[in-house]
Image (cartoon, coloured by chain):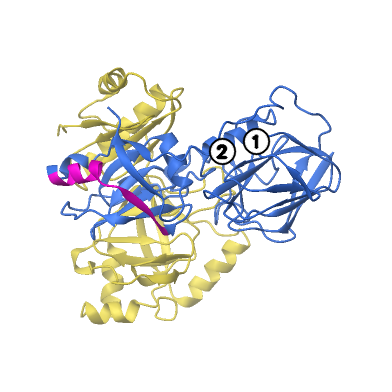
Chain colours: A yellow, B blue
């Protein structure tokens, strides 16, 4: 599929490239491929490329004098149908304890959706969610693919403190809070896994294009994994795709 | 020799800042860095520092600092009366500090953010290539009473700019220069006209993450798919509020991005207090 891209000046030193406004796996693969080309070909010129669902923001080191030259160069690098088949995407299996003792909104959620907690768990763990990008908070993964049956509008007024590791649903999205934060999503579970660690060279283990699947664990397994993480004796289950 | 600055009083929202944390937005890490980069740059150039050396930044109420070893410092940004060991000193000058010297500064008379620069910068831990404070990234995110911050002691006096004086403190610019934001063209002609003919006012909802304006703009544009934003991005919320993102802003957002401030204009709006007014002017 060929996409019609729009190139827009964003600031003195940034250009935005937009794909059509949709959340789509094929579009995203094309976007990631272009991102990699830009990061490789323009490595000396750019600070970074920030991505969203359907756009790339290219931040240059110095102010852009001739915007048309810069856009022409970008256009010449774009490969309309290309996907990056050299990248190794990973399926991450994320342990989550779906327990009312850890998840403040779990019971209310199951009531509102008229489903048992077990039904909720089997729906939430059935999907392999695609990582589209990281934003909102350091290490917060924007995941695509939440089952329609689990969609629920965000809370009217946000909770002031959602705990690190909380697994939550907001609207048509699901995600994991990588640190304590206010937030308007419904917390349905908790994961002992750390999604952001400044002590690692690469602070997030997951990257755009990877897949995430939640695995239900009981409170004992949750506690066991938590203590193994503290002792650096825990290896997250992952499969290279 | 390593000296230590003791924070005798922390002041208001005092932090360590450099130019910012670049290259980590892909992990959702905010850029951070000095709110008013112009004043920050002055603080460093007065001392012959590298551009990215750290300063202490505060809002309104400066900290009280004691220096354990000789060094040189500078004070820039929001205008304040400053004193070294009780004697009046000038802002925008290189100031020699002896062992045990105490810097006190009064509540700022104008503007918001002030800076103390020190020879070679304050040596707090560098995390993800930057020393700028940010919660959950750096070990601390605000300076507290009795904190001791390391610096490299220096007896040398940097001559080149020692007499540099700046014509005025902060240029209180009332025209903020902007680019069209990605969703600008979705505004109606009436909204566009309002945006460039109205006066806007900084509200008291202002911090290092964002500044909300008093005035709104009736909004009928749809929310967008979550997309990248930068410091200086002007968002229009569903309820019609206008929010200017600042240095500690998130890396992505879902509100329409109607304008983007120029780099200098980000510095200018950072230094405006609540009720400070301005208008937007399009860069052509």
Residue B240 in the image: above or below residue A82:
below
Seen in the image, is A200 located left or right of residue A195?
Answer: right
Seen in the image, is A86 located left or right of residue A24?
Answer: right
Marks 1,2: beta carbons within 8 A = yes
Q: Residues within 10 Å of mark 1 (few under 14, many from 20)?
A: many
**What is the C-alpha distance between the residues marked 1 and 2?**
8 Å
Residue A184 in the image: above or below residue B197:
below
Q: Is residue B261 magenta?
A: no
Q: Nearer the viewer, residue A26 or A71?
A: A71
* Residue named by callout 2: B169
Q: Residue A208 at what x, y percent from top left?
A: 36, 44
Q: Residues within 10 Å of mark 2 (few under 14, many from 20)?
A: some
Q: Quadrant of residue A42?
A: top left
Q: Quadrant of residue B74?
A: top right
Q: Residue B5 at what x, y percent from top left?
A: 76, 49
The answer to whether residue A166 is seen in the rendering is yes
What segment carries the magenta color? B190-204
Q: Quadrant of residue B176?
A: top left
Q: Label 1: chain? A: B
Answer yes or no: are tags 1 and 2 on the same subunit: yes
Q: Residue B261 at what x, y percent from top left?
A: 36, 39
Quarter holding the N terminus of chain B is: top right
Q: Nearer the viewer, residue B259 or B198?
A: B198
> What is the number of the mark on residue A84?
none
* Residue named by callout 1: B92
- Please report whichever mark, 1 or 2, sits nearer to the chain's N-terminal start: 1
């Amino acid at each position: 599929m060929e996409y019609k891209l729009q190139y827009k000046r964003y600031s003195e030193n940034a250009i935005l490239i937009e794909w059509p406004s949709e959340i789509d796996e094929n579009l995203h693969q094309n976007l990631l491929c272009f991102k990699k080309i830009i990061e490789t070909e323009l490595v000396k010129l750019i600070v970074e490329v920030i991505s969203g669902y359907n756009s790339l923001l290219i931040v240059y080191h110095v102010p852009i004098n001739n915007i048309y030259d810069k856009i022409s160069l970008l256009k010449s690098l774009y490969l309309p149908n290309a996907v990056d088949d050299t990248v190794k995407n990973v399926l991450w299996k994320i342990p989550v304890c779906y327990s009312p003792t850890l998840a403040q909104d779990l019971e209310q959620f199951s009531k509102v959706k008229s489903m048992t907690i077990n039904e909720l768990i089997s729906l939430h763990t059935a999907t392999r969610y695609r990582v589209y990008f990281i934003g909102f908070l350091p290490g917060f993964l924007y995941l695509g693919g939440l089952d329609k049956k689990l969609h629920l509008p965000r809370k009217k007024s946000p909770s002031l403190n959602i705990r690190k590791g909380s697994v939550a649903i907001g609207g048509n999205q699901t995600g994991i809070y990588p640190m304590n934060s206010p937030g308007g999503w419904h917390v349905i579970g908790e994961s002992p896994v750390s999604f952001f660690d400044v002590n690692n060279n690469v602070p997030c283990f997951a990257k755009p294009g990877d897949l995430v699947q939640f695995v239900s664990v009981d409170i004992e397994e949750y506690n066991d994994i938590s203590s193994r993480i503290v002792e650096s004796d825990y290896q997250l289950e992952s499969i290279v795709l | 020799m390593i000296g230590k600055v003791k924070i005798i009083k922390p002041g208001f929202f005092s932090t360590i800042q450099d130019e910012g944390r670049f290259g980590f937005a892909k992990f959702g890490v905010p850029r951070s860095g000095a709110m008013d980069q112009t004043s920050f740059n002055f603080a460093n150039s007065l001392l012959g520092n590298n551009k990215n050396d750290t300063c202490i930044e505060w809002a309104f109420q400066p900290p009280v600092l004691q220096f354990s070893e000789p060094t040189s410092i500078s004070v820039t940004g929001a205008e304040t009366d400053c004193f070294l060991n009780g004697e009046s000193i000038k802002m925008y000058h290189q100031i020699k500090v002896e062992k045990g010297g105490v810097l006190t500064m009064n509540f700022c008379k104008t503007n918001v953010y002030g800076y103390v620069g020190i020879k070679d910068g304050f040596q707090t831990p560098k995390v993800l290539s930057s020393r700028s404070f940010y919660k959950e990234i750096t070990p601390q995110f605000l300076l507290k009473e009795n904190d001791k911050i390391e610096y490299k002691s220096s007896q040398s006096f940097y001559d080149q700019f020692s007499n540099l004086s700046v014509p005025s403190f902060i240029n209180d610019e009332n025209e903020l220069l902007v680019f069209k934001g990605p969703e600008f063209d979705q505004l109606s002609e009436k909204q566009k006209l309002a945006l460039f003919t109205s006066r806007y006012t900084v509200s008291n909802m202002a911090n290092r993450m964002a500044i909300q304006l008093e005035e709104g703009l009736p909004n009928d544009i749809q929310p967008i798919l979550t997309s990248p934003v930068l410091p200086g991005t002007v968002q229009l919320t569903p309820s019609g509020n206008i929010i200017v993102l600042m240095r500690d802003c998130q890396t992505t957002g879902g509100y329409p991005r109607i304008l983007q401030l120029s780099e200098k204009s980000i510095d200018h709006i950072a230094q405006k207090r609540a009720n400070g007014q301005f208008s937007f002017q399009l860069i052509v």
